[in-house]
Amino acid sequence: MRQVSAGFSLFELLMTLLLMAMIAAIAIPSFANTVANGRIRTEVSALFHAVHVARKESIMRRSVVSICPSTNGRNCSANYDWSSGWLMFSNQDRDEPPQLDPGEALLQVHRASADVRIQANRRGFTLRATDQRATNGTIRFCDQHARGTARALIISYTGRPRVALENSRHEQYTCQA
């Protein structure tokens, strides 16, 4: 009578490990890009929604509402880097670039993901009631580790945001290092 082994040979185990390593080498970069794109989309959606809320608030309050970058959640930053997050507030004194002053209502604070780099061509966006123009501009969103697809949130003079993957020259958006 012959004995049957219930285990695997060393060759079978090595081949299985090799196959698993090859699948992982293909899947992990793709998964990392998927995660990066998800993070970028989350931040784009948050700011897209904030612009709509600011526009609505400016109409309801019949006053100026501004959105500006913030590193501490209490004051506007004096730069074009929105990567730490932003503030939305009722800008009673209509200062440009917008600054949150004592007595002005803070409407929203957003902390951005540390994995997403956000750069704008403005230090703030001001939305006004329907009889005046808003501040227009572009905000680019990229992954800090150069994964995923860069996107831009474009805000029109009427205060309407839209998301784009390419600029007006049909070139894909990129972020400077």
Image (cartoon, rainbow, N blue to C red):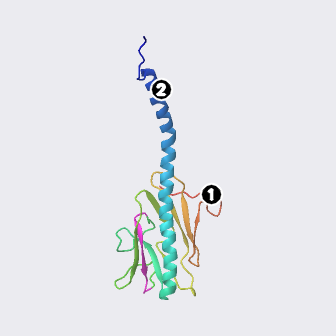
Position of residue 150 measured from the top left corner of the image (x, y, whole percent) = 54, 57
Q: Nearer the viewer, mark 2 or mark 1?
A: 2
Q: x%, y% of residue 156? A: 59, 74
Q: Where 59 sits versus 9, above or below?
A: below
Tell me where residue 8 appears, x and y as whole percent.
42, 23
Could you say whether the residue bearing mark 2 is in a helix, strand or loop? helix
> Circle 1 — which element?
loop
Residue 171 disc label: 1
| 5 w.r.t. 108: above or below | above
> Which residue reaches farthest top?
1
Quadrant of the drawing holding the N terminus: top left
Q: In the image, what residue type sits under mark 2?
A: Met
The residue lying furthest to the right in this view is: 169
Observer-nearest of 123 and 22: 22
Circle 2: is it few (<14), some (14-19), or many (20+) Cα within 10 Å? few
Q: Left or right of 33: which side holds 165?
A: right
Question: Vertical placement of 113 versus 64: above or below?
Answer: above
Give the residue type at disc 1: Glu
Residue sitting at the far front = 1
Q: Earlier in the sequence, mark 2 or mark 1?
A: 2
* Distance between the alpha carbons at the discs numbered 2 and 1: 44 Å
The residue shown at (48%, 69%) is 47
Return the residue at label 2: 15
Horizontal side of residue 48 vs 170, given as left or right: left
137 drawn magenta: no
- Residue 99 position by quadrant: bottom left
Q: Nearer the viewer, residue 50 or 74?
A: 50
Span of residues in magenta: 83-93
Q: Please tell me how crowded label 1 is: few (under 14), some (14-19), or many (20+) other residues with Cα within 10 Å.
A: few
Residue at 55 percent across and 80 percent down: it is 134
